[in-house]
Image (cartoon, rainbow, N blue to C red):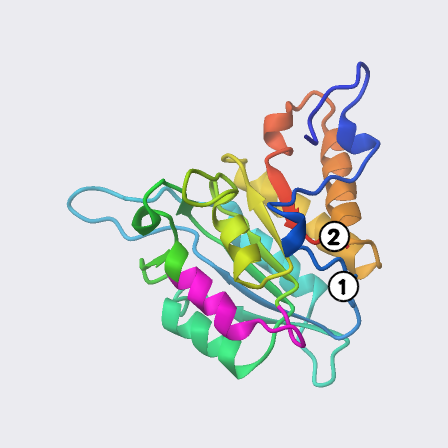
Amino acid sequence: MASLWTGNHYLIQDFAVATSPSLRLIDPRPLTTTNLQILSAGFASGECDASGCPYYPINGVKSELENIIELFPRSPDPLSEINEISQEEFSIKSLAEALEDKRYPILHIATHGQFRADPDNTFIITGKGEKLTIGALDKLIRKNSSDTSPIELIALTACQTGIGGNRSELGLAGVSIRAGARSAIASLWLIPDRQTATIMKNFYIHLKDGDSKAQALQKAQITAIESRPRNSPKQWAGLMLVGNWL
């Protein structure tokens, strides 16, 4: 929707865009940006074996996570803070333990991922090479998100985390919403990882400034358009917001 052409510019340049699997799943309350806590994790590349390298390097993951750390630094008494799980420590267990230890309104995961009709083949990859499946992600979110302390936003900046099928509309993002997260950012197709890092950095800048999630993503995508006007929508339009737009 963001890339629809009006005749002289894109729809996103006029309107903030969000996608809803079902209005019954939406609780449109704004995100509180004071005391904003973020848990981030990422996986940039995998180990090679006799069969080769199963996952190509995502060179932009490091800068993507560094950008977030710069925006949400650690401090003894933070107004906003980030807790990072390093690639070496990123596992299903470490992610579960971090979420159980503390409530995080925002969960940002930058890694490989894929969606298939078979739930067992729908997953994101941890730094340990594990596959966090659609079912495991569902259980993890349900366990750590409640009405009084919800996960406000899950950012899954991985390949095709927004693609759905017969079993799950809107892929891993849709599962995140149904499991209790209020909103998710996911990718409809493979976007150049450095471009993703820049878009997400600008998204969080605008979010900290008080914009809604939809407005923050809109402004980040407009910046991507204006910085390189000849770029096709493939370079920026694949990132979409699912669920609560406030």
* Span highlighted in magenta in the image: 136-150
Q: Residue at x 74, y 79 (%)?
A: 78
Task: Look at the image and say whether residue 147 sits in the magenta stretch.
Answer: yes
Mark 1 vs mark 2, CA separation in Å: 8 Å
The answer to whether 191 appears left or right of 90 in the picture is: right
Do residues under tags 1 and 2 come within 8 Å of each other at their CB atoms?
A: yes
Task: Look at the image and say whether residue 231 sits in the magenta stretch.
Answer: no
Residue 68 placed where, x, y %?
64, 60
Residue 192 visible in the displayed image = yes
* Residue matched to label 1: 31
Per the image, label 2 sits on a secondary structure element best described as helix
Q: Nearer the viewer, residue 165 or 82?
A: 165
The answer to whether 65 appears left or right of 4 in the picture is: left
Amino acid on which disc 2 is placed: Lys
Residue 73 placed where, x, y %?
68, 71
Q: Residue at x 68, y 73 (%)?
A: 81
Amino acid on which disc 1 is placed: Leu
Question: Which residue, as the protein is rendered here, is positioned at the far front?
Answer: 24
* Residue matched to label 2: 213
Which of the image's four quarters has the C terminus?
Answer: bottom right
Q: Nearer the viewer, residue 119 or 65?
A: 119
